[in-house]
Image (cartoon, helix red, strand yellow):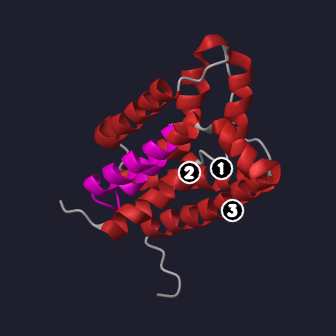
Amino acid sequence: MHINFLEIFAVFMVLFAIIDIFGSIPIILSIKSKIGNIYPGKTTLVAYGIMLLFLFIGEPLLGIFGVDVSSFAIAGSFVLLLIGMEMILGIELFRNESTGSSGAIVPIAFPIIAGAGSITSLLSLKAEYETINILIALTLNILIVYMVLRLTDFFEKILGPSGLHILRKFFGIILLAIAVKLFMSNTGIDLGR
């Protein structure tokens, strides 16, 4: 187990695109207007806890169902493909519903931050990268999530509606590329190498 800055950067970019905290700002602002406070610290810690749980015991949990990480990574590539399509085309395939005062945890911590895409990605990334590098990249992403949750109103003013729209489309394209890479690397398909 060794720290590799290229792996950390690669994992960081994957998780950054999947968590898509900047693209989630409009959803977070909507929830905040309904419930008042979104509790950035509590929300971030709950999301981090969920992702750590899957990072460390996700593989044994899959073993109970007789599924290996490569198979899960292939299934995850389809989830990422759909999320990327959702971001690019502006359609809603996955619903985010808020209920009452639990809005800080559901849906912000789960499933907006620690959703199917990020959990699937963590398990998929374990098939390709060392756990220490994934942990560092995840922690860096969680710090960004916390800062964005603290400064949501500020980012809305800076980026404006069109800036948020462009950011969402950009990260949608990155997710599509990541989905293709995950699928190919876990099926053994090699195009042009």
Q: Is residue 94 above or below residue 70?
A: above
- For residue 83, which numbered disc appears in the image? 1
Rendering coords of residue 140 (x, y %): 40, 50
Q: Is residue 34 above or below residue 69?
A: above
The amino acid at mark 3 is Phe
Q: Which numbered disc flags the more N-terminal residue, 2 or 1?
A: 2
**Residue interval drawn in magenta:** 120-146
Q: Earlier in the sequence, mark 1 or mark 3?
A: 1
* Gap in angstroms between the C-alphas marked 2 and 1: 8 Å
N-terminal label among 2 and 3: 2
Asked whether the beta carbons under mark 2 and mark 1 sit within 8 Å of each other, the answer is: yes
Q: Nearer the viewer, residue 73 or 80?
A: 80
Residue 31 can be seen in this image:
yes
Secondary structure, mark 2, is helix
Residue 170 is labelled as 3
Residue that appears at 41% across and 35% down: 48
Q: Amino acid at mark 1?
A: Ile
